Amino acid sequence: MSVVETANSGVEHRIRRAQRAVVQPVLSWYDAHARDLPWRRTGTSAWAVLVSEVMLQQTPVTRVEPAWREWLTRWPTPAALAGAVPGDAVRAWGTLGYPRRALRLHQAATLVTREHGGELPQTVAALRRLPGVGSYTAAAVASFAFGQRHAVLDTNVRRVLSRIFTGSEHPPPSGPSVAERGLAEAVLPARDSVAARWAVAAMELGALVCTARAPACGRCPVATACAWRVAGMPGYAGPPRRGQTYEGTDRQARGRILAALRRSERPVSAAALAAAWPDPAQHARAIDGLLTDQLIEQVGDHFRLPGG
């Protein structure tokens, strides 16, 4: 047997073992320790689940929860948001970061209202056709809102699977590979409802216990089945994992400019907006990028959020 075949055989053995030693303990742990997040409660609409998933992209739960509540109070349905101007969505997005997500939600709401009678489609393929909805978000909504059987691979789930089954501290930084997706599919319980619970339970385990920097192995329900822990928790040896910076970046400049526009109900002059960021060249790049992304509009020598 070749080295590759031996490695594959080892992974397959751990996958088979997972059905006995991993899935059920994680589900039981989730039942006892899951956070009471509003978008997980019974009766939450598919639209509300979609909003939560879009907001949670690269944004902590503590910042998302109040924004999510305010958003759903104002726009409880796709039709409600579709009836607003895009600038209202950008203004309501506040300081969540990556404000293009607000525009994509508005565009998705418009398409759902126009083509789906105001109800989110239920298949992954149809969900992926919505603006701003990629493979992860489509699988998450199909699983969490509609109870379907899909592999939901966010950063937390990828890390949990990597440690338990492949013995690596972190998954590759380039995004889910074919092998990762195959592993995630193989581990999924057969029943739709159980698979959907496993998806959110594995995600919660990664968020609360199997964290990136300080895993709490002593509280992990599957520590004895974890290949990484059994191997002595070896350090990550893959490609560099780059952290994100914010201070002094064009992204921060864009945020300052948008904040100035959010504070004003009227268009802001170019001269007044120049005070939002001190570096003229970086300010100009930020303005150009915001115009290109349709996050702001220019009216003469003034700027405003899209749609007035």
Image (cartoon, rainbow, N blue to C red):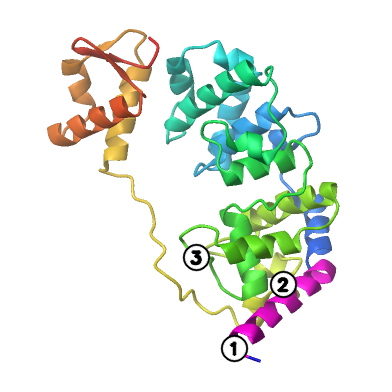
Residue at the disc numbered 3: 172
Which one is closest to the eye, mark 1 or mark 2? Answer: 1
- Local packing at callout 3 (Cα closer than 10 Å; few below 14, some 14-19, many 20+) is some
Q: Nearer the viewer, residue 128 or 283?
A: 128
Q: Is residue 84 left or right of residue 207?
A: left
Q: The residue under label 3 is which amino acid type? A: Pro
Q: Between marks 1 and 2, how big is the CA–CA gap?
A: 27 Å
Q: Circle 2 sits on which residue?
A: 223
At x 19%, y 24%, the residue is 275
- Magenta stretch: includes residue 20: yes
**Residue at figure coordinates x 70%, y 33% from the top left:** 38
Q: Main secondary structure of the magenta part?
A: helix
Relative side of 246 to 136, left or right: left
| Front one among 111 and 16 | 111
Note whether 273 is above or below 35 in the view shown. Answer: above
Q: Amino acid at mark 1?
A: Val
The disc placed on residue 3 is: 1
Labels 2 and 3 touching (C-beta < 8 A) = no
What range of the chain is rendered magenta? Answer: 2-21
Mark 3 vs 1, N-terminal side: 1
Q: In which quadrant of the rendered view does residue 302 lie?
A: top left
Instruction: Residue 171: give x, y in percent of width and height.
Output: 54, 65
Q: Earlier in the sequence, mark 2 or mark 3?
A: 3
Query: In the rendered image, is residue 74 in sight?
Result: no
**In the image: residue 291, left or right of residue 198:** left
Residue 135 is covered by the magenta coloring: no
Report the number of numbered marks. 3
Seen from the viewer's position, the closer of residues 231 and 10 is 10
Q: Which mark is residue 107?
A: none
- The Cα atoms of the two marked residues, 2 and 3, are separated by 22 Å
The residue under label 2 is which amino acid type?
Answer: Ala
